[in-house]
Image (cartoon, rainbow, N blue to C red):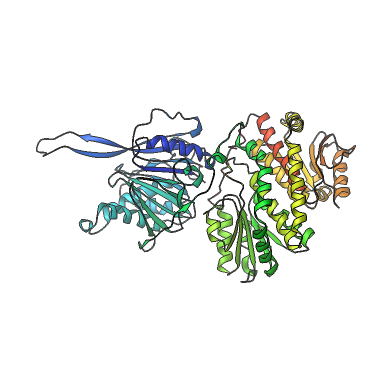
């Protein structure tokens, strides 16, 4: 979940490049930040010495707080630096626990993403060997273990310094239990080594310079030639070479670089005050691009579903609600039974999988550890694996037998918006393709684009802002829907919770009378989704039940009704109405956050990509 960026090469402003890289990655963690910089230190001539020599030294600058608040001036010149933005796991949020971490000798500096589950056992042995620990983190254990290995590797006179460094890191990495990525900076060999198991790392290759990042888009200003590291792999990087090895055997391996076709501007905020708002406004184009470019891919993918003996949708958080939407879409449009499970639970449900099963995973990042672990379990059952994923080269992308890139572009706000609507778009098209009527699916989605454009008009936005100001001091908001609108109610509640910190709960409208309505009080806001489908009357009854108990009803529907205290009209787009409906939910979450003076791009305690269990 943490952000990682490193540089080695011909430039003298390595520290500045790393700071800018970390700012681009801050959505991965913003509890603290830190940078390690290699500097030259001249050693004066001592009596008896034949000549001067120079020794490299590493300095570390780190502190709690956001990297976005840090000035880019006053960092020392260097051609070798690495940095980290932290989402805290082991140890509190303070300057000392921020990464990077030193070994005792200050020869190496290390940054880490993940959890070393057996750190306590390793630390006890290192303490017995008189290592001095400063922080509360599991990460510092890795630095001291590498230092211990550097001292203890046998036959050192027969090995090069770089071979010794590589072996010390390899031995340490192989002792770790858990999912981890580490990058180790070595002053003596002027190189760094990256190793990973689970957490993402991307190598960027330039001309006489090389980069490393936890996300590929942060490399776009410098290079488009990237390599997505595999699990259980070590890569040694210097300014003029990149060497890859198997972590278990130390066998050297060949790697193939990918050329990215991404647009740098898509990672920029542009005229918008926040990435979340920009990404909401991106959605009509994202949907249009999917409709225009992927008919054959949709038909091929729908055939996989048709030919499978059981299809299972898997996702976490926002992606889970897209999966739940999929179960309704496949049933309603194609008459097809498709199962759904939350990614973190699917690993306990794989016993019924067979080689004829199709597991279709949905993810923005492709690195969500609960989804990745579930897919690995499914592969052990020889099930076919498909993916709807937004990030080329991600772990989920590489694990999948069949994959479709969402094409939503870089999504930098922690609160996901356009990746969700991209997933819904693909699911609508897949369902209609199964039904043999993809043309109708495209027509409904184009109607949805028009409906979103209407919602994004100034007058409509002003109504959302006005309501948000009225609701921003409320403690609770309830959201109800039935059928296809039920997952949209869940997703709307999630957007409000994530962005504004207001307690919001989504419910199936029919479940109100089974216990939930006990929570209703005078003035309780209730958002009700009432599309033009078979659920309208029953959902309206739920809204009336809430109204009778003092609820303040916010209707999102194709037509007004006297039960509504506040009304948002939504064009009827048949099943695709769920897409403009959820855009209203996204905008409510955004404007509620703004009204409460909260940064919607970086909500507390959250990070964009959940890569730890």
Q: Looking at this rendering, what residue extends furthest in the bottom direction?
A: 355
Going 62% across and 66% down the picture, which residue do you hit? Answer: 350
Q: Position of residue 59 (x, y in %)?
A: 34, 36
Does the image show residue 65? no
| Residue placed furthest toward the right | 562
Q: Is residue 121 above or below residue 100?
A: below
* Horizontal arrangement in the rendering, residue 127 relative to residue 363 (left or right): left
How many marks on residues?
A: 0
**Quarter of the image where one finds residue 524:** top right
Q: From this view, report whether residue 211 is shown above or below residue 429.
A: above
Residue 163 locus on image (x, y percent): 29, 55
Residue 223 seen in the figure: yes
Residue plotted at (70% across, 58% down): 430
Residue that sits furthest to the front in the current view: 292
132 horizontally vs 553: left or right: left
Q: Position of residue 598 (x, y in %)?
A: 62, 32
Residue toward you, 216 or 349: 216
Q: Is residue 451 above or below residue 361?
A: above
Q: How far from the left and from the top, in percent, is residue 57? A: 29, 38
Location of residue 554 (image quadrant): top right
Q: Residue furthest left?
A: 48
């Amino acid at each position: 979940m943490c952000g990682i960026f490193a540089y080695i090469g011909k430039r003298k402003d390595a520290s500045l490049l790393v700071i800018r890289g970390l700012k681009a990655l801050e959505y991965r963690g913003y509890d603290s930040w830190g940078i390690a910089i290699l500097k030259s230190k001249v050693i004066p001539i001592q009596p008896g010495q034949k000549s001067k020599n120079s020794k490299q030294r590493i300095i570390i600058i780190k502190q709690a707080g956001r990297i976005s608040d840090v000035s880019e001036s006053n960092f020392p010149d260097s051609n070798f630096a690495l940095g980290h933005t932290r989402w805290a796991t082991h140890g509190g949020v303070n300057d000392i626990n921020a990464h990077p971490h030193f070994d005792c000798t200050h020869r190496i500096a290390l940054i880490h993403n993940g959890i070393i589950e057996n750190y306590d056992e390793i630390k006890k042995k290192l303490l017995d060997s008189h290592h001095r620990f400063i922080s509360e983190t599991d990460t510092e254990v890795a630095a001291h273990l590498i230092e211990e290995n550097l001292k203890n590797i046998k036959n050192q006179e027969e090995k090069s310094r770089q071979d010794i460094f590589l072996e010390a890191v390899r031995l340490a990495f192989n002792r770790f239990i858990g999912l981890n990525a580490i990058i180790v900076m070595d002053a003596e060999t002027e190189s760094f080594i990256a190793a990973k198991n689970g957490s993402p790392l991307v190598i960027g290759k330039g001309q006489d310079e090389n980069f490393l990042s936890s996300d590929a888009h942060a490399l776009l200003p410098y290079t488009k030639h990237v390599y997505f590291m595999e699990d259980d792999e070590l890569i040694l990087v210097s300014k003029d070479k990149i060497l890859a090895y198997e972590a278990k055997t130390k066998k050297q391996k060949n790697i193939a670089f990918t050329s990215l076709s991404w647009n740098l501007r898509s990672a920029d905020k542009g005229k918008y005050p926040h990435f979340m708002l920009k990404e909401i406004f991106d959605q009509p184009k994202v949907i249009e691009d999917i409709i225009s470019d992927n008919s054959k891919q949709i038909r091929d993918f729908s055939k996989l579903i048709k030919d499978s003996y059981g299809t299972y949708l898997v996702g976490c958080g926002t992606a889970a609600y897209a999966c739940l939407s999929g179960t309704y879409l496949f049933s309603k449009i194609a008459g097809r039974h498709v199962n759904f499970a939350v990614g973190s639970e699917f690993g306990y449900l794989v016993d019924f999988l067979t080689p004829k099963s199709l597991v279709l995973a949905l993810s923005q990042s492709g690195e969500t550890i609960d989804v990745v672990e579930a897919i690995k379990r499914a592969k052990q059952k020889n099930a076919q694996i498909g993916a709807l994923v937004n990030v080329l080269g991600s772990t989920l992308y590489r694990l999948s037998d069949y994959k479709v890139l969402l094409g939503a572009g870089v999504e930098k706000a922690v609160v996901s918006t356009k990746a969700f609507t991209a997933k819904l778009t693909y699911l609508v098209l897949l369902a209609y393709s199964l039904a043999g009527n993809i043309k109708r699916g495209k027509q409904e989605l184009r109607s949805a684009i028009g409906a979103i454009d209407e919602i994004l008009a100034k007058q409509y936005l002003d109504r959302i802002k006005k309501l948000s100001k009225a609701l921003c001091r409320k403690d609770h908001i309830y959201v109800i829907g039935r059928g296809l609108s039920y997952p949209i109610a869940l997703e709307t509640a999630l957007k409000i919770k994530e962005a504004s910190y207001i307690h919001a709960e989504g419910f199936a409208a029919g479940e109100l009378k089974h216990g939930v309505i006990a929570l209703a009080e005078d003035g309780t806001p209730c958002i009700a989704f009432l599309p033009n489908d078979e659920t309208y009357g029953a959902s309206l009854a739920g809204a009336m039940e809430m109204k009778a108990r003092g609820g303040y009803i916010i209707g999102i529907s194709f037509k007004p009704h006297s039960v509504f205290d506040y009304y948002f009209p939504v064009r009827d787009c048949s099943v695709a109405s769920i897409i403009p409906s959820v855009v209203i939910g996204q905008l409510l979450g955004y404007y509620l956050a703004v009204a409460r003076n909260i940064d919607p791009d970086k909500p507390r305690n959250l990070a964009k990509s959940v890569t730890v269990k």
